Each structure stands twice: as structure tokens, then as C-alpha cells.
Amino acid sequence: MINVTKTYMPDKEKYISYIDKIYESGWVTNNGPLVQELESRLAKFLGVKNIVLVSNGTVALEIAYRLLKLKGEVITTPFSFVATTSSLVSNGLKPIFCDIDKESLNLDPKKLEERITDKTSAIVPVHVFGNACEVESIEKIADKHNLKVIYDAAHAFGENYKNESLLNYGDVSTLSFHATKIFHSIEGGALIINDDRLVQDARYLINFGIDGPETVKALGTNAKMNEFEAAMGLCVLDEIELIQEQRKELYERYFNALTGIVEIQKKNENCTNNHAYFPILFKNEQQLLRVVKILKDNGINPRRYFYPSLDTLPYTQDSDVMPVSRDVSERILALPIYPGLELEVQDRIINIICDYHKEHDIYFEKK
Ligand SMILES: Cc1ncc(COP(=O)(O)O)c(C=O)c1O
């Protein structure tokens, strides 16, 4: 089966040489030398001031909420991976959804102000599929209402907005380094923190709040990345240019072949594209399900991503209905894209989608 993504496995000899070093030192976790090296290399690569590595992207969000002392209601997007909302609920915060723009698929700033109440403490938008949010509009509204902004940037690794890192927007941006992501450390994640004064607090929070052998300074948790994960991150980072080139080629081949046939997410023109995902939108769910069946019969396993809309979760059902997010989540399909995907397989995927649309005389009319 060809899946929607495949974990990138970097040079094995290099990984083994890191493992040898870990065995020699016996330092396997607790801010070891490889975690420190990965932090400083990633800060340079991404163009950010402060980065704190953690064990995954979900805890990165949770630490960010605690770091910024969020309370009450938090406005977020219903069109994301479940962790964006579940992390709020499991930290005692109430997600208030703000519907998305139907072309960018990101939280729609035009609908944001009407969702703000006197209980709102923050906004948690997502750069969906690596598409930059309207960061300036969001910042303006947040400043006006004195709200914190945390970007779930799990999909936005390595992107620049107006020539600087997209991750520098908001109070905090969080990343996921899960095995399925462009850059990965098996499991892992990071916080990008704008205010230098909060960095040390984040380091306490990820290590039980411990300040020294006999002092606990704050209520913390265990969110540390270990040395084996950092070693994988260092190896993948060494090959990141190759990974980016291969993704770009695949993305452009899909884009050229499928434009005008299916609907494609409208990208923010001020932002670079990391080619992390290639989602397509069908006219309706029925068409999507038919094409999924044909793809599966041909050994291709795409993913309904994101599905379902988060306003339908068992623990958010008291929220207002989000019509745009529900509609998009029923019609969207992420196609396989990863380094090593053979062009012949990609052509097969493209042909199946094009043939279905031609046979049924369905086209996406460009506005
Ligand atoms: C948008 C988004 N947020 C959060 C996460 C959670 O990251 P992790 O799997 O590293 O916990 C993911 C992971 O896939 C994601 O796609």
C-alpha cells in the first residue's frame, strides 16, 4: 500500500555513530549534548531566537498554554488535527471555534472579533498544511483585545513570511517533529518563544518545574526530548535540503496536473511553501468517497485530513456549528507526498483522479 506519507529514514551509519556516542557517555536524556546541539542548529536553520525542544507537538501546545497562563476561553480553528483542540480541553480551557476561510482553509480573521468575550484569554490559529495565517490581521485583533496568540505551526517547518521566519509571529509557535513530518526526530516537538524572559520558565515547565536538586519552582510536567530522538533529528537535518527538493518536485507535478480539475488550497502569497502536504478538494463527499475507493483498489491509501471537523468531537458538541469547516472536511483528501514516492506511482494517482473527473465531466471552475 502507498500511504499518504512515509517516515524519512536518514543515513543509517551516521545514526549509528550518534548511538555509539550515547552509549559511550551514558547520557540518554535530561537536556543532553545532542538535544543542545539540535536546539542550536535548528534555531539557526529556522531563523528564530529561542527554541525549546520537547517530546512531541501536543505537549508543545500544552506547555505554551501554561507558559502564557491561559484561562477561560480560547478561540481556535475547527479545521485542524484533533490535538489542537484536545490539548485545550485537557488543560481545562474551553475551545471557542472560529470558522475558516474556504480558500485558505485557515481561521478567518473576519469572523474572529465576534467570537471574543470577556472570558477570552488567547487565540490558537493553525497554519493549515503550512499555509501561513493572516498573521497581521490576527495580531491587530489580539493587540486590541489584549489576547495572547499561539500558532500551532506543526505544518509550518522552515517557512518564511515576508523574508523572516513565520515562526516569529505570535507569542509562541509550536512545532511537531513526529515521524510523518517534513523534519522529524521520531517523536518530538518545539516551542518558539518570542519573549526572552519566558524561555527559562518553559525549561522549568518541561522538567517537572525543577530548579535544582532540591528546589521545585513551578508546577511542571515531563516533556523532555531524549538523546536518541535528538540524534535522529540531527541526521534528518543534515539531509533536509534533499527532502525539500524532492517534496517540491512532487508538489509541482500534482499542482500542474490537477489545477482546474479539483480545487486546491489558496496559498498566502507572502509566505514560502514547504510542500508538506498536497490536499485536494472534491465538489462533494460522494465524489471523494468514490475516488478513495478507486485509489484503494489500486494500492493507494490517501487520507481524509482533516476529518472530522473538530466542532463535531464528543467533547465539543456544545459548540456552535462551523459550516465552512464541516463542508471542507467532508470534501478534502490529502494525497501521498514524501521523498522516495516514485513518479510512476504519482502518475497513477494523478491519472485516477483526472480520469474520474473526465468520465463524469466534472471540473473545478477557476474564479
Ligand atoms: C496541526 C497539528 N497540531 C498538532 C499536532 C500534534 O503533534 P504530535 O503528533 O507531535 O503530538 C499535529 C500532529 O500531527 C498536527 O498536525
Image (spheres, rainbow, N blue to C red):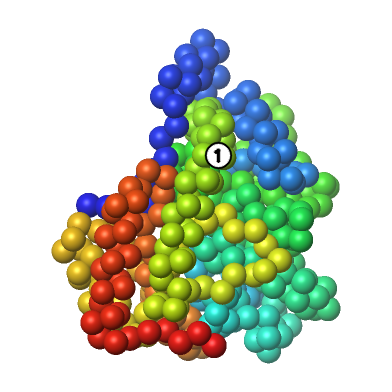
48 vs 284: above or below: above
Local SS, label 1? helix
- How many callouts does the rendering have? 1
**Badge 1 is on which residue?**
240
* Residue 128 place in picture, x, y as percent: 55, 66
Looking at the image, which is closer to me, 130 or 256?
256
Task: Please state which amino acid type lies under the numbered disc 1.
Answer: Ile
For the point 49% across and 68% down, the residue is 80
Quarter holding the C terminus?
bottom right
* Residue 176 place in picture, x, y as percent: 54, 50
* Residue 353 place in picture, x, y as percent: 30, 71
55 vs 238: above or below: below
For the point 41% across and 35% down, the residue is 9
* Residue 338 place in picture, x, y as percent: 41, 49
Looking at the image, which is closer to me, 47 or 99?
47
115 vs 305: above or below: below
- Is residue 313 in sight in this rendering? no
Q: Is residue 20 left or right of residue 351?
A: right
For the point 46% across and 23% down, the residue is 15
